[in-house]
Image (tube, grey):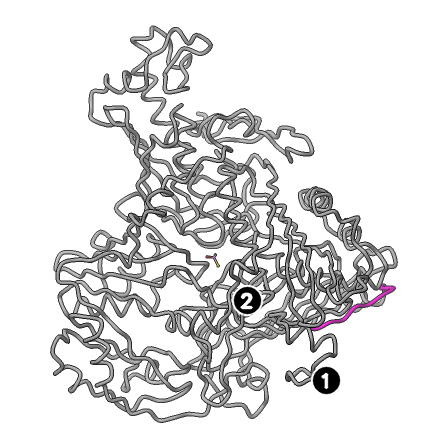
Amino acid sequence: MDSPKTTRTEKLPYGIASVGLGETERQVPVDEPPPLAPNAALNVIGKPVARQDGRAKVTGATRFTVDVHLPDMLHARILRSPLPHARIRSVDFSAALRRPGVRAAMIVARPEDPVTATVRYVGAPVAAIAADSISAAEEALRLIRVDYQTLPFVVDMDRAREPNAPQIYDAASAPEGSPSGYPARRGLPLAGNVRGPAMDTLGDVAQGFAQADVLVESEYRTRVQTHCCLEPHAIVANWRAEDLTVYMSTQFTAGVRHELAQAFGLPLSRVRVIVDAMGGGFGSKSSLGNYGRIAVELSRKAKAPVRLVLTRAEEQMDSGNRPATWQRLRLGARHDGTLTAISLLSYGTAGVTLGAGVGNFAQALYRCPNFESAQYDVFTNAGPGCAMRAPGNTPGAWGMEQAIDELAERLSIDPLLLRDRNDPSAVRREERRIGAERIGWLRRRPPGADPGPVKRGLGMAQSIWGTNVQLNSSCEVRVLRDGSVEVLSSVQDIGTGISTVLAQVVAEVLGLRPDSIKVRIGDTEFPSGPPSYGSRTTASITPPARTAAWSVLQKLLREAAVPLKAAPTELIAQDGLIMVRDQPARSMHFAEVTALLRTDQISAQASRSDDYSGFRRHMGDAAIAHQDLGGVQFAEVAVDTETGRIHVERVVAVQDCGRPINPRQIESQVHGGVLMGLSYALLEERVLDQVTGRMVNPNLEQYKLAGPCEIPNIEVVLLENYQGNSATDAYGIAEPSNIATAAAIANAVYNAIGVRLHATPMTPAAVLAALGRISPRGEQA
Ligand code: MOS
C-alpha cells in the first residue's frame, strides 16, 4: 500500500527581481496554498500599506504595559547594590515593613544562599518592596538595612585580563553557555576572569598566510552600547488563586509564559501573558528577566496586582547591553585580491555574563579557504550584556569590514572590486551595483583629497544574517457570519508592524482590504506565535497565516459553490467578492457567502512548516534556511578636522529580506537600523568609573544618542529576492539593517581624512586625537 501523499510538486518564483526572475521546483505540503506570484502580480502583499495601529499610536490611545492599571494595584521598586562587588551579610526589613503602605517585601540577594549572596555589579538587585504608591515603595527602600562586605572589583576589560585582577567568579559559580550572543558554547575553560577560547578553524591558516602576497593586521575596539528602548521594561503581574496573568513589555509572550510556568511551578494553562503594544526591545526584552520574577513574586506575596516599571537609570545599568569587544584581524591575499587566510582573535566583555564574542561574521561573509578564530569572554564587575540587534555581527562588521578596506588600499584595488572578488553572494553583488550607482561611487577620491578643513568621504560595508525561522509558530484565521475576519496568534508587535503584515497576508488570500482584517495578537490565549527576535517574526508567522486563511477560504468556497452553481475549484476571492474565475458576473459579496454559514464562525489554524528547500541548521525551536540575507550600505560623511565633528550626510541602504511584504514598514525599520548603527559609530558609550564601579552616565543626557541634528538623509532600496521557501517566502530585516552602518561610516571617515579610527565611538576628541591635534587624553597636542 502506498503511504498517503504529503507533498506535491510546485514551481515557485525564484531569483532577484531586478536581475530577472526564474522559477524553482519545490515539494510543497499538500495542505498549503498554491505558490504566491511575485509581488508585482499581487494586490495587497508588497504594497506600502499604512500601519493598522498608526492612528492609535499618534493619538495616545495605544495601551502600552505602563498604561495597564488594575484595581488595587501595588507599585514595586527594587533596592540595587551601590557596590560593584560585595557579599551580603544581612538584610533587615523590619523598619521598611513598618512604613505605612508597604504590602510586601522580598530579598533577592539572600545572605544564606551561596548563589545569590554575592552581588557583582552596581545596580544588581538586592531586595524589593511592593507598596500602595511608588513613593511609598521608594521610601521603604531607604529603610532597608543591608550589611555589605565589600570585595575587590574590576570594571575594565583589559585590567580584568591581568593575572592578579580581582576574580569575579570561581569555576563553580561562573555562568555556563550564553543566554544569547556569541559564542554560546558550554564547557570552555576559565582562567582568572578569561573564559575560552571558542575556536573555529577551516583549512590551514599558516599555509594560507604563506601563500599571501600581502598581509594586513589591525586591531579594533567597540564600546558597550545600551538598548535604550523608547518604552522601558515594564510588567504588571496579577497573581490570583486560580491563575497568573502578566502584562509585560516582552519580545516573546509564549516564551515568558513557559518561563513563568517553570519558575513558579504552574501548569501552562494557568499562565497568561499579554502585550498590546511595545516601544522596542532590540533583544533586551527577550525573556522574563530578574525584574519580571520580582514583580510576580511580590504579587504572590501581597495577593494583589503589582506594577514594576524600570527607571531610565535601571534601564542603563541592568536591562542588558551590547558587550564591548577587542578584535585583532589578520588578512592575507594575493595581488589580485583573492583572500588566502583570515585569522581573528577577540576578547569581549558582557560584564557578569557571557556572550561577548563577535560571531561568525569574519568567517561567513567572504570565501576564504583558510580561517581560524579564537574568541574569549572576559568577566568584569559590570551589568549583564544580552542580545542586541545582530549580536556579534555588528561589532564583528566594525572590525572585518574595516580590515577589508585596509586590504583594498594596500592592494590599490577599489573596495567594491575586492568584495566582488571574494564575496560569493549574488544578492550582495547586485546590492553593491545598485548602491554604488545611487551614492555616486565614481565621485570617490583618494583619502584626504579635500584641501579645506572640512573633508568629505565615501565608504561602504556589508552585512550577512541568517534566514531564521521559528518552527513553533501558529496562527488561527476566523471568518465570522457577518463577513468580518480575525487573525489570532500570541505573536507580539515589537513596534515594527507585524499586525499590519498579517492583515495584508490574510487580505490577499481572502480578496479583502487589509484594514478590514482584525488582527488579535500579543496574548497567549491565542495559538503560540514566534518571538520578536532573531529577525524571525515575519518569516515564521506569515506562512501559517497564509495557510490558515487559505484553508478557511476553501470552506467558504464550498459554501459559495451551491448558489453560484460552480465547482469550488472554479471559484476565487477577489475585490470583496467570491466569483467564478474570469466570470465576474457570476459572483457574490464576501458577506453574502458568510451569511450562509451554519455556524457563527468558521476557522482554521496552521503552523510553520519546514522551508521547502529544507534547513541548513536546527537550533531547538528555530532553524536557519540554506540562504543568507545580504545587505550593503554606503555612507557619505563630512569631517571637520578643526572641531573633530563627523557629520554623516547620507546613507544608502540596499537590503533584501526575501519577499518584502510591506515596503513602507521595512523602510522604516531600515531607518531604525541605520540610526542605531550611526549612533553606535559616533556617540554611544557606557562609561564606568574605575574607582567606584558606577556608570557615570546612566541616563539619556550624558549617554549620547543620535538626535535630529545627527540624522542623515537615508535612502532605502529594497530587493525582492525570491527563494521558493515557504507560503510567503518572506524574511526579517531588523538585524541585517543594523550590521553594516557603523563600519560603512568608519570607512567613509577614512576616505575623508586619510586616518583610520579603530574604536567606537568616533567622537570629536577621538577624531582630533587620530589627526594628532590633541593627545588621546584630550590635551592640545
Ligand atoms: Mo534581537 S537582538 O534578536 O531582539
Q: Quadrant of the N terminus?
A: top left
Name the spot of residue 354 as percent of width and height, x first: 49, 72
Give the residue at the far front of this rendering.
452
Question: In the rendered structure, which amino acid carries the disc numbered 1?
Answer: Ala
Looking at the image, which is closer to me, 129 or 360? 129
Question: Is 692 covered by the magenta stretch?
Answer: no
Asked whether, in this view, residue 194 is left or right of residue 436, the answer is left
- Which residue carries the number 2 mark? 183
Which residue is at 67% across, 82% downward? 776
Q: Could you tell me what secondary structure mostly forms the magenta stretch?
A: strand
Name the spot of residue 430 as percent of width and height, x first: 70, 42
Residue 753's mark?
none
How busy is the neighbourhood of tag 1: few (under 14 within 10 Å), some, or many (20 plus)? few
Task: Please determine whether, in this image, residue 134 is positioned above or below residue 608.
Answer: below
- Which residue carries the number 1 mark? 781
Name the spot of residue 456 as percent of width and height, x first: 73, 59
Task: Please determine whether, in this image, residue 748 is positioned above or below residue 53.
Answer: below
Instruction: Identify the element where label 2 is drawn.
Output: loop
Question: Is 214 covered by the magenta stretch?
Answer: yes
Instruction: Identify the element where label 1 is drawn.
Output: loop
Task: Please determine whether, in this image, residue 444 is positioned above or below residue 545.
Answer: below
Which residue is at 45% across, 35% downward? 49
Question: In the rendered structure, which amino acid carries the disc numbered 2?
Answer: Pro
Magenta-drawn segment: 211-219
Please tell me which of labels 1 and 2 falls first in the chain: 2
Is the Cβ of the residue at disc 1 closer than 8 Å to that at disc 2?
no
How busy is the neighbourhood of tag 2: few (under 14 within 10 Å), some, or many (20 plus)? many
Looking at the image, which is closer to me, 644 or 311? 644
